[in-house]
Image (tube, rainbow, N blue to C red):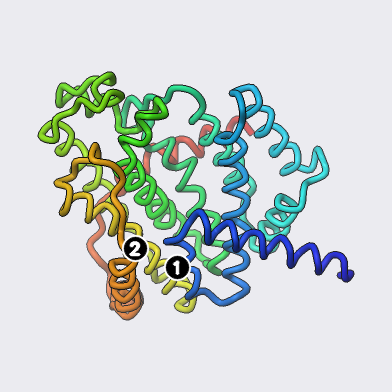
Amino acid sequence: MSAVDISQEAYVVSDAQAVLAHHAKSFRLAAVFLPVDRANDAAVIYRFCRLVDDAVDEAASQEEAHQNIEQISKELHRISTPRMEIASFLAVSKRLSIPLETADALMEGVISDLGSVRVKTDKELAVYSYRVAGVVGRMMCGVLGVKSEQAIPYAIDLGIAMQITNICRDVLEDAHRDRIYVPIKRLLQKEITEEAILKNQVLPAQISPVIIDLLNLAELCYKRARSGMHYIPFRTRVAILIASRVYRAIGLKLRSKHNANPMHGRTIVSKTEKMWHVFRGLLDALHPITLGWISSKKSPSPFYQHWTELQTNDNMQS
């Protein structure tokens, strides 16, 4: 490798670490517990995911957003010369055997955020959550040094759990963008209309049961993910246990402090609270279940059928 190549690689990693630190403070906190090389790989993966997000979120129009994603796809599949961020992602993906289909799925998920968004059913929620977060869990399997294919469903469960946590936290913020990710079918069962969500005219007694049900689904996914942590090498496992704890804390606080009413605004976990959950994550690393010494009773994954069907359809089309 030439001096120029080394310089470019150092720049990309440094930039990726800066983006991670700015946009994903919870993950950055967990990444402190990764070996340096693994932390660098995680940052490069995150930088690519952020590039895809920004290609849509920062576009001046829907047409520009589609063009941005199309260009990223061309670079990803080497139809066009990839820019440094994508070239670095491709290098890491090849070295760690991360399938490029995960990046394709991510781009499909991000494109679905364009314009007005209405998630109608739990199946649509599962498809969206898999594409924008579950596939990131799959990517991270390579970064963390996971060898067993049996770990993948648990990694996807964790990504989906985190995404549902996001959705529950950001109902009001998303409504300001004309986006409703809480399944419309669930809202209508509590006589909540789309207009009521968009205008913040929902009674806490109406919305709270809906959010509690979604948080319970997320909790089930968190628990399933925890039962699969033993597939991750111990040195990198600690970081994911911490990330899971810190992210899960958002939903727990939304439920305990705000009675699962997301219309008050974004629920924030303080630095002190995060440190407590970091400590609990460290303790989790010594638990017999995460060490793989005993097996926990596993409930079926609530979204497994939906995303496996999606994978099957995607494979048939490719």
Q: Which mark is residue 110?
A: none
For the C terminus, the image quarter is top right
User: From what the image shows, is residue 36 above or below residue 8?
Assistant: below
Where is residue 42? Give x, y as percent.
Answer: 57, 62
Residue 29: image tag: 1
Q: Residues within 10 Å of mark 2 (few under 14, many from 20)?
A: many
Using the image as rendered, state which of residue 192 and residue 109 is in the foreground: 192
Q: Is residue 205 above or below residue 231?
A: above
Q: Amino acid at mark 1?
A: Leu
Q: Residue furthest bottom?
A: 286
Q: In the image, what residue occupies the spot 39% across and 71% down?
A: 230
Residue shown at 61%/27% (left/top)?
60
Residue 137 x, y percent position in the rendering:
48, 54
Dot 2 falls on a residue whose secondary structure is helix
The reply to whether discs 2 and 1 touch (Cβ–Cβ < 8 Å) is: yes
C-alpha distance separating marks 2 and 1: 9 Å
In the picture, the quarter occupied by the N terminus is bottom right
Q: Position of residue 139 (x, y in %)?
A: 55, 55
Q: Earlier in the sequence, mark 2 or mark 1?
A: 1
Question: Which residue is drawn at the image coordinates 44% and 70% (left, top)?
Answer: 239
Question: Residue drawn at (52%, 32%), measured in percent from left and top?
Answer: 313
Q: Position of residue 22 (x, y in %)?
A: 52, 57
Residue that label 2 marks? 246
**SS at mark 1?**
helix
Position of residue 220 relative to residue 118, above or below, is below
